[in-house]
């Protein structure tokens, strides 16, 4: 068995703590300020990044890294709140698209400034330019490794 060296173990445990605590803190901030969850915000960001605010359900799931059932349940909750709609794909009649509604667009536009402030305060205000560059390189390398598999 190849165990982690002490410095690797420390880095790994810090990473696990960060990937648990940071999303939880951002989720609390979003809910307090806008009544959106971090998951809602993630979906809405994906929709604001595509033309006409619409994307196939499968592509959205892949972009978010979510399982089909999680995405379906979450979209149902968002539909009930009027943030998104699901429509059949007009061009080929197969599958459906998730569509950003006016309510959804207004919600993300209202939530984004406080969310960006929170991300700055919790992350970028405590990192210098070299640390941001190193973090970008590190995450790019790790994501590429995950995409290779």
Image (spheres, rainbow, N blue to C red):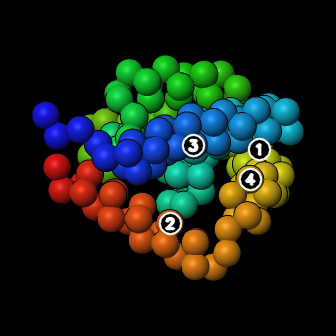
CA gap between label 4 and label 1 equals 22 Å
Q: Earlier in the sequence, mark 4 or mark 1?
A: 1
Q: Read off the residue under disc 1.
A: 107
Specify the farthest residue to the front.
Answer: 6
Local packing at callout 2 (Cα closer than 10 Å; few below 14, some 14-19, many 20+) is: few
The local secondary structure at tag 3 comes to helix
Query: As drawn, is 78 to the left or to the right of 54?
Result: right
User: Where residue 39 sits in the image (x, y, percent)?
Assistant: 59, 35
User: Where residue 50 sits in the image (x, y, percent)?
Assistant: 50, 60
Q: Read off the residue under disc 4.
A: 122
Q: Earlier in the sequence, mark 3 or mark 1?
A: 3
In the rendering, which numbered label is found on residue 135? 2
Specify the farthest residue to the left.
Answer: 1
The local secondary structure at tag 1 comes to helix
Q: Read off the residue under disc 3.
A: 18
CA gap between label 2 and label 3 equals 13 Å
The local secondary structure at tag 2 comes to helix
Of residue 132 and residue 6, the one placed in the foreground of this image is: 6
User: Where residue 88 sits in the image (x, y, percent)?
Assistant: 40, 36
Of residue 18 and residue 47, the one placed in the foreground of this image is: 18
User: Where residue 117 sits in the image (x, y, percent)?
Assistant: 81, 57
User: Residue placed at 29% from the left, 42% from the top?
Assistant: 4
Local packing at callout 3 (Cα closer than 10 Å; few below 14, some 14-19, many 20+) is: few
């Amino acid at each position: 068995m190849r165990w982690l060296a002490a410095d690797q173990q420390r880095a790994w445990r810090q990473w696990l703590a960060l990937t648990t605590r940071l999303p939880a803190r951002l989720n609390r901030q979003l809910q307090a300020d806008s009544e959106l969850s971090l998951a809602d915000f993630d979906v809405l960001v994906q929709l604001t990044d595509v033309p006409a605010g619409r994307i196939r359900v499968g592509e959205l799931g892949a972009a978010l890294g979510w399982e089909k059932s999680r995405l379906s349940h979450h979209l149902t909750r968002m539909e009930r709140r009027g943030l998104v709609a699901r429509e059949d794909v007009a061009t080929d009649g197969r599958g459906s698209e998730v569509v950003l509604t006016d309510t959804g667009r207004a919600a993300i536009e209202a939530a984004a400034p406080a969310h960006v402030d929170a991300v700055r305060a919790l992350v970028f205000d405590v990192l210098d330019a070299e640390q941001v560059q190193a973090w970008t390189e590190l995450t790019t390398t790790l994501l590429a490794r995950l995409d290779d598999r």
